[in-house]
Amino acid sequence: MNKQELFIIFLIVLSGICDTLNQLCIKSSINTIDMHVASLKKAFILVWKIAWMPLAWLAFIFSCTSLIIWLYVLSKAALSFAYTVDSMHYIFIAFASSLILKEKVEPKRWLGTILIMGGIILVTLTGAD
C-alpha cells in the first residue's frame, strides 16, 4: 500500500470520526427536548429550540467537515473502495454509543460489528485504485 492509499484511508477514517461526533451531538441534543409535535406551531417551536442548541451547531460543523473531506476522498479514490471503507461508521457508532451515551449494545450487534471490521479489512487490502 502506497502513501496516497494510506492518506485516503486516513481521510475516510477522519470523515467517519466527524460523522460519529455529528451523530453523538445530534442524539445528545434531541434527548433533551420533547419531540412530540401535534401542530404546526409546535413544529416551529421545536425547530426554533433546535436552532439555538450549541450541540446542534456543533453537529452541523462536524457534518460540514465530514462532507468536505468526503468530497476530496471521492475525487481521489474509487467509490466502491471509499464507500466500503466508510462502513467504519457502524463500528465507531457502536463503540461511541456504548462508551459515551451508555447505551447497551447486544452481543449479536458486537458480532455484526466484528464482521463489518473483517469486511473493511479485506476491502482495504485491495487498495484504493
Image (cartoon, rainbow, N blue to C red):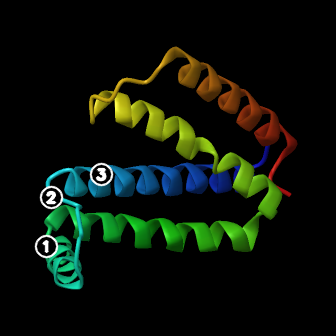
Relative placement, left or right, of 106 versus 71 is left
Label 1 Cα neighbours within 10 Å, binned few <14 / some 14-19 / many ≥20:
few
Dot 3 or dot 1, earlier in sequence: 3
Residue extending farthest front: 38
Given the image, on which type of amino acid does mark 1 rest? Lys
Q: CA distance from mark 3 to mark 2?
A: 11 Å
Given the image, on which type of amino acid does mark 2 rest? Ile
* Residue 13: mark in rendering: none
Dot 1 or dot 2, earlier in sequence: 2
**Residue 29 sits in quarter:** bottom left
Q: Which residue is mark 3?
A: 27
Tell me what residue is drawn at x 42 percent, y 56 percent. 18
Observer-nearest of 97 and 44: 44
Tell me what residue is drawn at x 37 percent, y 36 percent. 96
Dot 3 or dot 2, earlier in sequence: 3
* Figure check: 84 above or below 75: above
Return the x and y of residue 80 as percentages of the image width and height.
81, 57
Q: Secondary structure at mark 2?
A: loop
Given the image, on which type of amino acid does mark 3 rest? Lys
Observer-nearest of 84 and 56: 56
Circles 1 and 2 in contact, beta carbons < 8 Å: yes
Return the x and y of residue 5 as percentages of the image width and height.
74, 52
* Residue 49: mark in rendering: 1
Tell me what residue is drawn at x 72 percent, y 56 percent. 82
Label 3 Cα neighbours within 10 Å, binned few <14 / some 14-19 / many ≥20:
some
**Residue 113 sits in quarter:** top right
Q: Which residue is mark 2?
A: 33
